[in-house]
Amino acid sequence: MIVVDPNAVAYLYLPGAFTANAERLLEREPEWAAPLLWRSELRNILAQYMRKGRLGFEQAFRIQREAEALLAEHEYDVDSFDVLELARDSGCTAYDCEFISLARRLDVKLVTVDAKLRKAFPNIAVPLSGGSNAGHEGENAHDLER
């Protein structure tokens, strides 16, 4: 099992620079987990695509439903104390620290495209890409193929 950020999920359904990496990751690690917040973050990404005319409503809804099915058995609430403590100590957002908190609780890695998060938590957060692309992903969950 691994914890994934919303970009890793989105790259499975929205073609982009890391789609192949996300597909390989799913083959290697088929059990993906996330805090419940991931649903809202993915919806926000999909809403951006709809506003830009890159996805229709039906497509966006289908992607959300498929992604929810993928993580259905592995969605978790997180401890607010832990999240706030992580945010205070790292300077990262509370949103991002939900993913770190869950990865720590499950004793697994967080796969993320967020370079700031990987820098703040190098023992927990690992890049979606490997090899020469490591460290060159976007800074947040909204950098998918602008």
Image: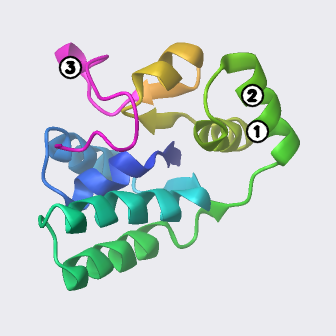
The reply to whether residue 125 is in sight is yes
Q: Which residue is mark 1?
A: 83
Query: Split into 4 quadrants, where in the image is the C terminus?
Result: top left
Q: CA distance from mark 1 to mark 3?
A: 29 Å
Residue most extreme to the front = 51
Rendered position, 71 above or below 23: below
Which amino acid, mark 3? Asn
Callout 2 environment at 10 Å: few (<14), some (14 to 19), or many (20+)?
many
Report the colour scheme: rainbow
- Residue 75 screen position, x and y as percent: 61, 63
The reply, left or right, for residue 117 in relation to residue 9 is right
Q: Can the viewer see residue 122 in this picture?
A: no
Q: CA distance from mark 3 to mark 2?
A: 27 Å
Disc 3: CA contacts within 10 A as few (<14), some (14-19) or many (>=20): few
Q: Disc 2 marks which amino acid?
A: Leu
Left or right of 79 on screen, residue 139: left
Which label is found at residue 133?
A: 3
Q: Check if residue 141 falls in the magenta segment.
A: yes
Give yes or no for contact between labels 1 and 2 (Cβ–Cβ under 8 Å). Answer: yes
Foreground: 54 or 80?
54
Say which residue appears at 34% left-offset and 44% top-offset: 142
| Dominant secondary-structure state across the stretch colored magenta | loop
Mark closer to the chain start, 3 or 2: 2
Dot 1 falls on a residue whose secondary structure is: helix
- Which segment is the magenta one? 127-146
The residue singled out by tag 2 in the image is: 86
Instruction: Please identify the quarter of the rendering in which residue 84 is found.
Output: top right
The image position of residue 11, as x and y in percent, is 25, 51
